[in-house]
């Protein structure tokens, strides 16, 4: 199976220019171009519209008219196109810098690269790219004597594809389309059929299609408007899938489709009654059960049925508020990761195969207030526990006899996680390792002998890791007791003299941890003297569950003040010049940078905001908007006055006022289903009315894409290069 996740900045690979100066941070500062005078921005006319809350509060949203759920209103589309034309005019003088950045980034990508193959049910599966092509090829080779991960990699590197079976050539599927993405694919248990989910506009409303892998024929069955979550039954004719609500896009119904029968006859398996829950489906580790997992911000419920006869699903443990759990099955037991019983950082329990309640759970790994448990992978003789402590990931190996050890790391600031391990009877554990200076590396560790072997490191042509330095520092928060971890990377030769340009990235929501990893795009910035800082602020889960709880609901403002406090600390310590600081965030990170732009605009020279969630109150008052009902326990429900009053204090759109704002680059996708395009559109329109500075504000709408931006591995680098060219100009970084 291959899944494609939402785009997260900071995980692309790039390498330095061999001609970079030894100490680029000391380069002469260039004056920003007079970009604001290049054209006249479009003017979105105001139209009063009252947004009312049930408790009587009312706000005027003069740009509410920019909302068009169908994306068909000519006036709205004309405005977005006018903003794009303005962006083209403003950014035209920077085209040379944009092209240079793009060429550097693409040159550092091994274009005919392939992933590390993994073995499952007699086949080795992998993904490969071909030179000059945007999209992956998903393929497999039959297992045989002498065939292993390394031999397949050598064959792929030599462009020897004899014996390969192509499952999906996404380049062919995407031909002639403005946007195309395969969200997921699954092979039937007998290895003969393939189901895959395709998205044609980035809205994550998938169409499921089928291929007969023996004949190569695309079957006539197709299912429209679905989630990307798929699982085959043991009969190799029945596919379980999740149907989305066409308006809210919430995952609502699990159905099963029998190949060759009309989709209208598909049987309803389960319908989720609570709009605050998402759903996913899958198989257990031992393939014994099919599972349906319903999950909200604060609760979980798992159903299971025998994969050989999935006629009736049994609840493993009924949902209860503030009780989260996930589970997997191997042998004769369920292994459960849960926060039940006050285990805020989670613990591990086990239960019999026929369990139906939490009373049957027995603790296996106790709760530890200093160690957050993120996940568990089960093997016949051991379990691999993904956990974090002191804002660093690690893997704990726990053997059947109860003995434990940790997988060793090679650096002080790094990211480590479980890789593809589809075979539970193996004594080899695969895991990935990366840092700000180390490209993503896949290792295998023999848990019996301790032998470690490197399977693959992300190739980065021309990159020399010895020329870059990463470090972990701790910034004091304004409350006087909290220390905020920060990961830094810069080119060797950098001096902490307070003159360098600084780019600070943050997210801080949903308990999502932003771990330090190698970035393809960022190396071009480092080579120009930019210091890159990853701020592990509250609202993430880098420091455990309390770190998350202290940055959500009525504690949300901690996320924003943490980010500002990190900026103050880094400038004070000489990592950046006070007038050369850029802030970057996307999605909920766009909320972050929108909030800090209102709270401390004088501390930032330029702000980069991608698909930003900036109109929190209006969105959270509308349950028809995708994600709203799922997120009451993240932001609070503004239909309740306590949460309304708190959210309105920080919602970026509501707190814009007449003052000088930093230069801004705001990006969105017309078909975004996570953060609707009209949020940043309204934000920019109101910002233009109130901003008293002469710094440029650029608003770029991708008219063919959704939350993750353009599809294809190269097209997104063009977008990043445009944004970074704007930032470098505003920071006074001279052309190379």
Image (cartoon, grey):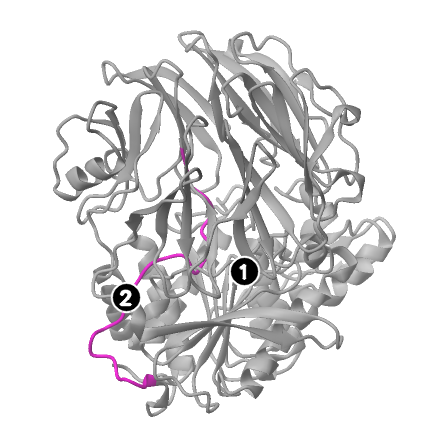
- The secondary structure type at the circle numbered 2 is loop
Q: Position of residue 277 (x, y in %)?
A: 68, 35
Most common secondary structure along the magenta stretch:
loop
- The secondary structure type at the circle numbered 1 is helix
Q: Position of residue 86 (x, y in %)?
A: 40, 69
Q: Nearer the viewer, residue 695 or 563?
A: 563
Q: Which residue lies under the disc numbered 1?
A: 681
Q: Quadrant of the C terminus?
A: bottom left
Q: Nearer the viewer, residue 409 or 679?
A: 409
Q: Residue at x 65, y 60 (%)?
A: 47
- Can residue 669 be seen here? no
Q: Does 19 appear above or below 723?
A: below
Q: Position of residue 172 (x, y in %)?
A: 23, 34
Q: Nearer the viewer, residue 658 or 183?
A: 183
Disc 2 versus disc 1: nearer the observer = 2
Q: How many marks?
A: 2
Residue 15 is tagged as 2
**First of labels 2, 1 by sequence position:** 2
Q: Residue at x 40, y 62 (%)?
A: 84
Report the span colored magenta. 2-24
**Is residue 261 shown left or right of residue 50?**
left
**Whole-Å distance between the Cαs marked 2 and 1?**
35 Å
């Amino acid at each position: 199976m291959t899944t494609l996740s939402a785009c997260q900045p900071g995980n692309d690979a790039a390498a330095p220019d061999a001609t970079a100066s030894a100490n680029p941070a000391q380069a002469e500062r260039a004056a920003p171009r007079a970009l604001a005078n290049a054209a006249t921005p479009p003017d979105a006319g105001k139209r009063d519209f009252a947004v009312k809350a049930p408790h009587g509060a009312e706000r005027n949203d003069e740009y509410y008219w920019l909302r068009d759920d169908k994306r068909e209103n000519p006036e709205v589309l004309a405005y977005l196109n006018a903003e794009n034309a303005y962006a083209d005019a403003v950014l035209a003088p920077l085209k040379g810098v944009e092209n240079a950045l793009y060429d550097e980034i693409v040159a550092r990508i091994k274009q005919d690269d392939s992933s590390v193959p993994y073995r499952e049910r007699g086949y080795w599966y992998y993904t490969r790219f071909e030179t000059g092509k945007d999209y992956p090829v998903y393929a497999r080779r039959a297992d045989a004597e002498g065939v292993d991960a390394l031999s397949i990699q050598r064959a792929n590197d030599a462009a020897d594809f004899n014996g390969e079976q192509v499952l999906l050539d996404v380049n062919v599927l995407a031909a002639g389309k403005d946007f195309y993405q395969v969200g997921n694919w699954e092979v039937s248990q007998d290895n003969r059929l393939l189901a895959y989910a395709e998205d044609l506009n980035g809205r994550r409303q998938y169409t499921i299609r089928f291929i007969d892998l023996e004949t190569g024929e695309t079957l006539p069955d197709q299912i429209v408007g679905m989630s990307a979550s798929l699982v085959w039954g043991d009969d190799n004719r029945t596919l379980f899938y999740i149907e989305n609500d066409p308006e809210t896009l919430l995952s609502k119904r699990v159905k099963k489709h029998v190949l060759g029968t009309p989709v209208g006859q598909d049987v309803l398996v389960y319908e989720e009654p609570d709009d605050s829950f998402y759903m996913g489906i899958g198989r257990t580790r031992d393939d014994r059960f099919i599972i349906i997992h319903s999950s909200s911000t604060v609760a979980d419920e798992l159903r299971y049925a025998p994969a050989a006869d999935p006629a009736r699903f049994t609840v493993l443990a009924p949902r209860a508020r503030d009780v989260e759990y996930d589970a997997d099955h191997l042998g004769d037991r369920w292994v459960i990761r849960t926060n039940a019983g006050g285990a805020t950082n989670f613990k591990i329990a086990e239960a019999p195969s026929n369990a139906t309640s939490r009373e049957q759970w027995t603790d296996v790994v106790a709760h530890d207030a200093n160690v957050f448990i993120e996940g568990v992978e089960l093997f016949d003789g051991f379990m691999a526990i993904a956990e974090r402590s002191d804002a660093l990931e690690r893997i704990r190996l726990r053997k059947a006899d109860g003995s434990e050890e940790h997988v060793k790391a090679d650096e002080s600031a790094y990211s480590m996680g479980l890789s593809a391990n589809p075979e539970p009877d193996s004594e080899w554990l695969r895991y990935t390792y990366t840092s700000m200076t180390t490209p993503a590396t896949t290792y295998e560790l023999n848990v019996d002998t301790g032998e470690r072997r490197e399977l693959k490191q992300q190739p980065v042509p021309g990159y020399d890791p010895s020329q870059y330095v990463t470090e972990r520092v701790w910034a004091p928060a304004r409350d006087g007791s909290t220390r905020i971890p920060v990961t830094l990377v810069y080119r060797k030769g950098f001096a902490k003299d307070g003159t360098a340009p600084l780019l600070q990235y943050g997210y801080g929501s949903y308990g999502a941890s932003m771990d330090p990893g190698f970035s393809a795009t960022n190396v071009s910035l480092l080579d120009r003297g930019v210091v890159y800082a990853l701020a592990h602020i509250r609202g993430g889960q880098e420091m455990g569950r309390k770190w998350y709880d202290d940055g959500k609901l009525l504690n949300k403002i901690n996320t924003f003040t943490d980010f500002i406090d990190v900026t103050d600390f880094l400038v004070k310590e000489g990592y950046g010049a006070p007038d050369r600081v850029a802030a970057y965030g996307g999605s909920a990170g766009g909320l972050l940078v929108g909030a800090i732009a209102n709270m401390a605009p004088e501390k930032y020279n330029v702000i980069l905001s991608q698909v930003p969630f900036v109109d929190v109150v209006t969105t959270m008052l509308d349950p028809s908007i995708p994600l709203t009902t799922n997120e009451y326990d993240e932001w609070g429900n503004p239909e309740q006055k306590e949460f309304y009053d708190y959210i309105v204090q920080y919602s970026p759109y509501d707190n814009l006022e007449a003052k000088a704002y930093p230069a801004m680059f705001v990006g969105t996708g017309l078909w975004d289903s996570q953060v609707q395009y009209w949020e940043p559109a309204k934000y920019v329109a109101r910002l233009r009315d109130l901003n008293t500075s002469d710094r440029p504000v650029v608003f770029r709408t991708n008219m063919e894409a959704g939350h993750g931006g353009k599809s294809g591995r190269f097209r997104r680098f063009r977008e990043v290069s445009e944004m970074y060219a704007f930032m470098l100009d505003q920071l006074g970084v001279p052309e190379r």
